[in-house]
Image (cartoon, helix red, strand yellow):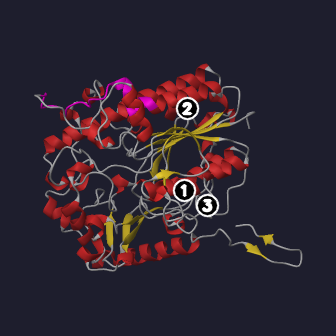
Amino acid sequence: MPDQPNVLLLIIDQLRGDALRCVGHPNAVTPHIDRLAARGVTFRRHYAQGSPCGPSRASIATGMYVMNHRVITNDAPTAQHLKTLPMFARELGYEPALVGYTTTVPDPRHAHANDPRFTTNSIAGGWNIVRDFEEPRAHYLAWLSGQGYTIPDTYEQLFRPPPGEHDPTWFAPSPIAEQHTDTAWCAEGALDYLRIRAKKPWFMHLGFFRPHPPLMPSAPWHQRVHPKDTLPPVRAASAEAEAAVHPLTKLILDTMKVSSAMHWMPGLARDLSLADVGRMRAAYFGLLAEVDHHVGRVMQLLQDTGQLERTLIVLTSDHGEQLGDHHLVAKRGYFPQSYHVPCIVVDPRPEADATRGKQVQAFTENVDVLPTIMQWLGAPVPRQCNGRSLLPFTRSPGPSQWRREAHWEYDFRDLAGGAAHERLGIPRDDCSLAVQLDERFAYVHCAALPPLMFHLPSDPHWLVNVADDPAHREAALHCTRRMLDWRLSQADRTLTGYAISKQGLRQFDA
């Protein structure tokens, strides 16, 4: 272990797992992230455990599946007894710094109903906040005001196409200059902090909000990728055909608004033209190109100050983005575009040299992030964690045993304005699903709705539900049993393994 080891956790919001040039996406302009991948190990089949941001970030922070931490929506509280990443960092003597945000809601059993934290999202306790980009983005808006901008009532209102004629090839650029974007603002905060910590150990969570909507990059990033060059969406021949797959699919298609991605556009995502999908994708990759530029600045500072050789870097995202796939935008439902996210781990130690540039095909998950960081810091993996450290993959030949599937969960009670249960005719608490993905099948189990199953060798894009196909009956039963195995073995284990004895409290190995 290097002296004074550092940790840089990079979370790039809404970044799809296929959206990097280093994994083959032709529209990605990501040279700096690609260099990170060349220095580390890239996990090609890495998945977030929930959506939207709140459930997924709770899984990153606790190392737990959604079924255990129970942060089921952005607005759901986090149980106070759960220990999180910044708390573990403090126990190891670090002051964990945060640039960006990490959505949380306090436990109402331990906070008064009048607490203003119940009126908006807030940043989880334990972080030393360097720059706060949590909703309603007040710190950033205040800074923008100081740069001479007129500040509207909400952050989203900044991103309205200005009046006048524009080149119809692209969406209009953001009215925010490139040096004043929230991406640049967060990067500057990180750079300032890292300069003064060059001689001291540090632990930083650097979060970039982009390429999260509004999908409106500043110039010149808005023209970095040409809409006509973007890949076409993966989807059924029509929205009606897509909706026929399942009642939940239909509900999402009937209610998902284009404004979830482009705040100024009316209508439903299902009605987007291919031209508008191309413009949307160009905007997305323009925002990502800007993020990549600033990631490069951070990496350059670490290199110039001699900090790279003692810094573990973990890059991932909280969830993906549909980008028109399956006639949808944003991140909702069960489709892999909403949950497949990148993961790059850079271990600077010489022992990892043999695996630099390696791309791993094993199923990995965001619950593995906390165990990875804990092992890097020389600490045991907390008993609450459902994940495992990824550091063994930085050694050849890697771990001898690993999981055979990936899992994620989605609670959809907030769909359709919170009336999903009424629209679907099921109890509110049954508005949930779990997904199991293995080499051959994607299995989606819904609490009170029919299951879905997709045969991946013949249907890699999840278009044909074979859950009730007699030819796949045995496979469906196997998938159901495997999911039950998963839930039984991964149930909350915070206090399991402890027992009294004549010598006092004992803890047994997992």
Residues shaded magenta: 166-185
Between 238 and 398, the one lying in front of the other is 238
Q: Are marks 1 and 2 in contact (CB under 8 Å)?
A: no
Numbered label attached to residue 367: 1
Q: Is residue 374 visible?
A: yes
Q: Is residue 129 above or below residue 428?
A: above
Indicate whether residue 212 is drawn in magenta: no
Give the amino acid at mark 1.
Val
Residue holding disc 3: 385
Q: Residue at x 74, y 38 (%)?
A: 1
Marks 1/2: CA distance?
23 Å
Q: Residue 283 placed where, x, y %?
A: 26, 36
- In the picture, measured across the screen, residue 415 lies left or right of residue 32, that is left
Give the amino acid at mark 3.
Cys
Q: Quadrant of residue 221?
A: top left
Q: In this view, which residue lies farthest toward the front?
A: 114
Q: Where, quadrant-wise, is the C terminus in this rendering?
A: bottom right
Residue holding disc 2: 39
For the residue carrying disc 2, how many other residues have a C-alpha within 10 Å: few (<14), some (14-19), or many (20+)?
many
| Mark 1 or 3, nearer chain start | 1
Q: Secondary structure at mark 2?
A: helix
Numbered label attached to residue 28: none
Q: Residue 225 placed where, x, y %?
A: 26, 30
